Amino acid sequence: MGNKSVLVVGGGMSGITAAVEAAEAGCEVFLVEKNSYLGGRVAQINQYFPKMCPPNCGLEINFQRIKKNPKINFFTLAEVESISGEEGNFNVTIKLNPRFVNENCTGCNKCTEVCPAERDDDFNCGLSKTKAIYLAHPFAFPMKYIIDANACQGDSCGKCVEACKYNAIDLKMEPQTMTVNVGSIIWAAGWKPYDIGKLSNYGGGRFENVISNIMMERMAALTGPTQGKILRPSDNGEPKNIAFVQCAGSRDEHHLKTCSSVCCMATLKQVNYVREQYPDANITIYFMDIRAMGKHEDYYQKVLEEKNVKLIKGKPSEIKEVPETKNLLVLAENQFTQEVETLEYDLVVLATGMEPATAEDKVPAQLNYDVDGFVIAGPPTPGIYAAGCTRKPGDVASSVQDATAAVLKAIQSTVRR
């Protein structure tokens, strides 16, 4: 019946879905994730739209399905190094990077309490710090700590080793490699927010109070850097005049040409975040057009009815900083009034688009990509299938559907030869 095993690359929502669906269909599954935890970008989100509920419930259900299914073998801190062979018989070499924390870890946090070294918290987009030994986030799966080798002082310190009663810390861990033989591969490596540092005309990465939409998600989360309080990074002040800039780096021949499809709804959702905390805040949305398709139209209309919400049809050409206050001046042509306006804000949120992981880290096999790095359907290597936001931008629901479709193709590959 062929090689009924599937490699799934990427532990975000599409990858988790693919792994669970393939395993429950009877396939042996190897799930590989580059981060120290499963959940991908969804784990960073504060709330889903339009229900405005947290994602942890849905993630936990899938984590339980993974735990209970012996056909799923998952590896975090893992990367695919090479792929050889053909459909029905792929040999894949996987690099397992050291966590420096073994299976004895109970998550007691004693190691973090004594660690003297700090690092930027990448899960919180650099808005906070963690110790060199840390838990990625409070709902991390697996619930195991990790040491950042670039921040750790190593054997010259060793305080975490002394503090651990369970012998869970091994500073001598080395990278390892393993090889698996699978019938098919699902590449669901996901996406990353477009780098606001590339948006020089918007002051991205230079002006403290210009943040990305993902940074806003982390601010609004109770487990985030500000315990759920939306604050100006420069002075922790409460913003009362906020601008959202749509298509920041998207639908732009100099950046991402693709519409990322979710940014409009993400901004409308974040308007609600602001309104809940600051009922009297003034909110302005700069847009080319609002893409609230189908069932989301009602959500869009509801936001329009909120007081002190203003829409300006026009893409800002420049954002400047007021040095004395670190406020932002947004220059844009308002197409409604046909006037060029410069308005001042406490905080500017850039709705950055989805850049696929494959824009930089290509699949180590022959595949086709579009101009933005998304994998194009109809791969020249049969048996390798892209899924979720590796293939096209989309929300969680569409990514889950796309992953299920990829599983059907992958299963066919495992029995075809």
Image (cartoon, rainbow, N blue to C red):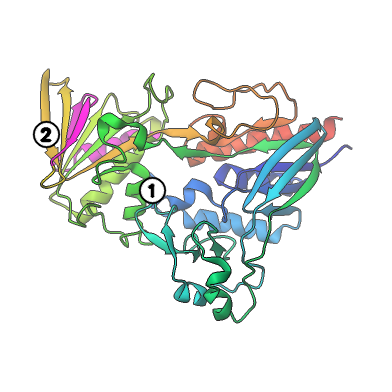
Q: Which residue is mark 2?
A: 343
Label 1: how many Cα within 10 Å (few below 14, some 14–19, many 20+): few
Across and down, in percent, residue 312 comes to 18, 28
Q: Which residue is mark 1?
A: 51
Q: Is residue 317 magenta?
A: yes
Across and down, in percent, residue 92 comes to 76, 40
**Residue 23, numbered label:** none
Across and down, in percent, residue 151 comes to 49, 60
Q: Is 208 located above or below residue 37 in the figure?
A: above
Which residue is found at the position 59% from the left and 27% from the top? Answer: 375
Is 374 left or right of 224, judged from the image as shown? right
Image quadrant containing the C terminus: top right
Instruction: Report the span colored magenta.
Output: 295-322
The residue type indicated by label 2 comes to: Leu
Q: Is residue 292 magenta?
A: no
The residue type indicated by label 1 comes to: Lys
Which residue is found at the position 89% from the left and 37% from the top? Answer: 1
Is 89 left or right of 223, judged from the image as shown? right
Q: Is 174 located above or below residue 259 in the figure?
A: below
Q: Secondary structure at mark 1?
A: loop
Residue with the most extreme bottom position:
165
Which residue is found at the position 44% from the left and 24% from the top? Answer: 258
Label 2: how many Cα within 10 Å (few below 14, some 14–19, many 20+): few
Q: Is 304 located above or below residue 315 in the figure?
A: below
Q: Nearer the viewer, mark 1 or mark 2?
A: 2
Residue with the most extreme right position:
1
